[in-house]
Amino acid sequence: MAGSKLIRGGMIVTSTDLYAGEIMIKDGRIEAIGKRLEAGEAEVVDASGCYVFPGGIDPHTHLDMPFGGTVTADNFESGTRAAAYGGTTTIIDFCLTSKGQSLEEALRIWQAKAEGQAVIDYGFHLMIASLGDEVLQELPRMIEEEGITSLKVFMAYKNVFQADDGTLYRTLVEAKRLGALVMVHAENGDVIDQLIREALAAGHTDPIYHALTRPSAIEGEATGRAALLTGLADSQLYVVHVTCAEAVQRIAEARSQGLSVWGETCPQYLVLDQSSLEQPDFEGAKYVWSPPLREQWHQEALWDGLRSGQLQTIGSDHCSFNFKGQKELGRGDFSKIPNGGPSIEDRFTILYSEGVAKGRISLNQFVDLVSTRSAKLFGLFPRKGTIAVGSDADLVIFDPSVTRELSAATHHMNVDYNPYEGMVVMGQPISVLSRGEFVIRDLTFVGRTGAGQFLKRSRFSGGEAVMEPEKRQTSARANT
Ligand code: URP
Ligand code: ZN
Ligand code: ZN
């Protein structure tokens, strides 16, 4: 059990508040928040000059994942350690499934990857490859008993992960009935497949053709299609890794019609652009994500979406592959470059630096985007995602005055390049606590492999803070 701690001298920031205060931690939870709290036996932690944020929640990671003929460079140990260095105390990773495989089996495989490895808490989203009878029968148990309350459908990666529209629609219907949130990778996989064939037939093999064969219009089209099906099913949808103006527009339209449609973007789409894929000597492969990096002007649409609330979360989509030996699999054929890149460590600080420090978003919006809204959408609030009495003591002591350069030479991700190499950022997580224990202390890892716990999450509650009916009854009884 974690020893008591008193965090003193910092500015506490939540998605709604900003004040100087002290936090008393006991048994892994926040016991009290106030001023001039009595330290007693508690260890006093000095947070002077720092913000104290709720631990970051990264709703989109791929650790220890087989993809593109190889396996991601980061596993649950290295990936979660890097996440903690970067101010993230909870991740939700994607449990892959395949057609014909039982959900039970897929979950056991993913549990085995994470258990005894993760240094911070973690949950899983469950991929839906197809909806056969067995999967339909298993779904209620996955959601109600295993607490896996979000389902993922790929509209792209034809012949690998892609599901058809019928499967997406039926998943939306089941999710509504059972209380889960459906997540989509929204790109038109059939059209992309055709464009890739045409490009290769014309001898276009360089990394830039990855971007040119996945135009933003078809991300917009798929986003609009998924939103339309969500309306038909009267269900709920979360669009992962939104990259472009067209997709933001479709999400905004759906929301203006009252649909429960939510959008996530990622640091790479906010600060990098398509020109990186043109780097010589195949270096452009380092910047191959799907959907791809876009022309720079799309960044403004993404920032506008975050500022105005049309996009609500920041995921890292961390899916790291080494340049040497992994990205290189696509030399001579861009379609064989493993898709994805490393961002788990830099997600939090990039959003602070490019968002708050550059005046694009407020401190409260920052907390909502990197932590609170994901907790609300994915059934973790108020245990995670805020600083409140009774919440887990997942905290980040963040020094906003530090200026530093992001680099593979100093990062903690198990990958041989950093897509943000040389980028100067403001701010650094100095110390990070998970359930009241230091994971990072004064920039040094002091956590424990396997200390992270699997999180059973509550059912989808509309993306806001609501109490589940059974808990409401208990609290009503307690009040009489
Ligand atoms: O390129 C990406 N995004 N790789 C990870 C898999 C996915 O589509 O999220
Ligand atoms: Zn994706
Ligand atoms: Zn992803």
Image (tube, rainbow, N blue to C red):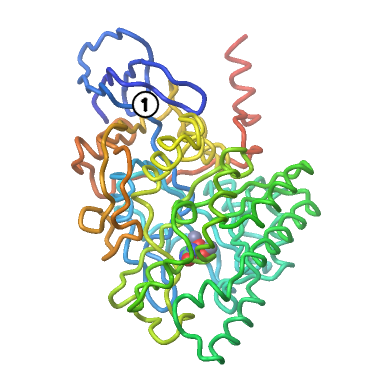
Q: Is residue 106 visible?
A: no
Residue placed most toward the observer, 410 or 282: 282
Could you tell me residue 97's position as x and y percent?
53, 67
Could you tell me residue 28's position as x and y percent?
33, 29
Could you tell me residue 51's position as x and y percent?
34, 27
Residue at 40% across / 63% down in the picture? Answer: 341
Give the quadrant of the C terminus: top right
Could you tell me residue 6's position as x and y percent?
27, 19
Q: In which quarter of the image is residue 219?
A: bottom right
Other residues around mark 1 within 10 Å, as few (<14) / some (14–19) / many (≥20): many
- Please, is residue 95 above or below residue 469 in the view? below
Q: Mark 1 points at which residue?
A: 29
Q: Which amino acid does the dot numbered 1 rest on?
A: Arg
Q: Can residue 363 be seen in this view?
A: yes
Q: Is mark 1 on a helix, strand or loop?
A: strand
Q: In this view, does 199 lie to the left or right of 28?
A: right
Residue placed most toward the observer, 149 or 352: 352
